[in-house]
Amino acid sequence: LKGNVILGEPRNLACLAKTWKGLSSKTCPQEMDENEGVLLVEKLKAVDYEYREDVHWTKCQSLLGTGSFGDVYKMEDKQTGFQCAAKKVRVEHFRAEELTTCTGMMHPKILPLYGAVKEGLWVTIFMKLMEGGSLGQLLKQRGYLPEDRALDYLGQTLEGLEYLHACGVLHGDVKADNVLLSGDGNHTVLCDFGHAAHLHPDGGGKYLVTGDYVPGTETHLAPEIVMGKRCDSKVDVWSSCCMMLHLLNGCHPWTQYYNHPLCLKIAKEPPPLREIPPSSHPSTAHVIKAGLEKEPTKRASAAELRAKVYTALQQVGGLTSPWRGEYREPRCLQ
Ligand SMILES: N#Cc1cccc(-c2csc(Nc3cc(F)ccc3O)n2)c1
């Protein structure tokens, strides 16, 4: 059995990932057994240039969650015993941007990539294990979050976005399911670059709705995306405030007022500011208003919005409530 899995550098992985794009199941039989990839950490060990599921690594029983285009499992390297998270994506659904946008990214609020391997018709992407699970899962357990917790998580998410945008990358699917938590619930990282895109260096927008672009979560889509206009990093700011409404209410924006297809409403209707809980502090409302400007040039940047979030967090008395507290009936079902 031939293999071509190496311990390498992020740029090796970015380069190899581009050759995986668009391979379809119509490939020849020997392709079915191909095993190639780049591992970025010593704790994931290829053996004779091979790294195969159930041979060199195995999935642990639990399904951790569902990412874009694939399920996420806890996995263990059979040689080193090291455990991490792994998402399996069919090559037909694999987008090279999932790896080219986040390789080489080093920031406390961005989930570290450990490598990726193609085995037959599957691409497996390895990332750091986050014991706290996703913010989406926490929300299901708590109904909706206290204002200080929601502000703190929004602020950390915006820190990660600020770094991403400075690197010329837009995430494309900012939502609670793609924000992961440390074991103590106090630190977040942004994950899942399945909808990410490289921004033009001139900072000009990019036509997202083209060839292989798959839109992110409909309820969180910015107006300029649904109107097929040029998009830039501001689309992530809009989505982060849709996530904020989701954290504060326990339900996605728009869904209580409109039926599908929501994209027509997102384009036509005013921003969903009426969904800001009346009990919110005025500074919190100010943050959401600044992030839900329909005109991207008027919308706050991730850096500007982060500053407003920290002010609001101070105004509400800082972070005081526990991350796992009592369940609160989502506001949308009241
Ligand atoms: N650890 C962990 C954990 C727990 C719950 C959900 C997720 C989750 C949601 S999207 C997601 N994407 C993802 C996970 C990988 F391991 C590798 C690439 C990915 O895009 N992971 C991860």
Image (cartoon, rainbow, N blue to C red):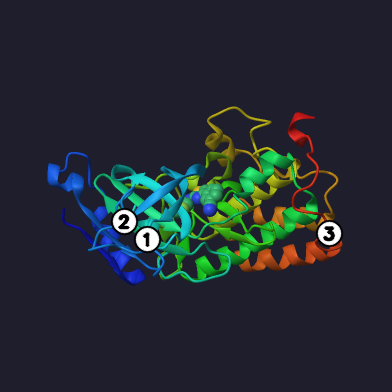
Horizontal relation, residue 50 to residue 86: left or right: left
Q: Toward the viewer: 203 or 129? A: 129
Quick one: quadrant of the C terminus?
Answer: top right
Residue 269 visible in the displayed image: yes
Q: Nearer the viewer, mark 1 or mark 3?
A: 1
Q: Which residue bears the numbered disc 1?
A: 79
> Which numbered disc, 1 or 3, marks the residue that appears first in the sequence?
1
What kind of residue is marked 2?
A: Val
Q: Residues within 10 Å of mark 3 (few under 14, many from 20)?
A: few
Q: Tell me the CA gap for discs 2 and 3.
A: 42 Å
Callout 1: 10 Å neighbours few (<14), some, many (20+)? some
According to the image, label 3 marks what residue? 320
**Is there a contact, CB below 8 Å, between mark 1 and mark 2?**
no
| Disc sitting over residue 117 in the figure | 2
Res 39 → quadrant: bottom left
Foreground of the two, 55 or 182: 55
Calculate the distance from the C-alpha at mark 1 to the C-alpha at mark 2.
17 Å
Where residue 278 appears, as percent x and y from the top left, is: 84, 44
Label 1 vs 2, first from the N-terminus:
1
- Element on which disc 1 rests: loop
Earlier sequence position, callout 2 versus callout 3: 2
> Of circles 1 and 2, which is in front?
1
Q: Residue at x 13, y 46 (%)?
A: 30
Q: Nearer the viewer, residue 145 or 202?
A: 145
* Residue 189 drawn at (x, y percent): 58, 60
Q: Is residue 191 left or right of residue 126?
A: right
Q: Position of residue 35 (x, y in %)?
A: 23, 54
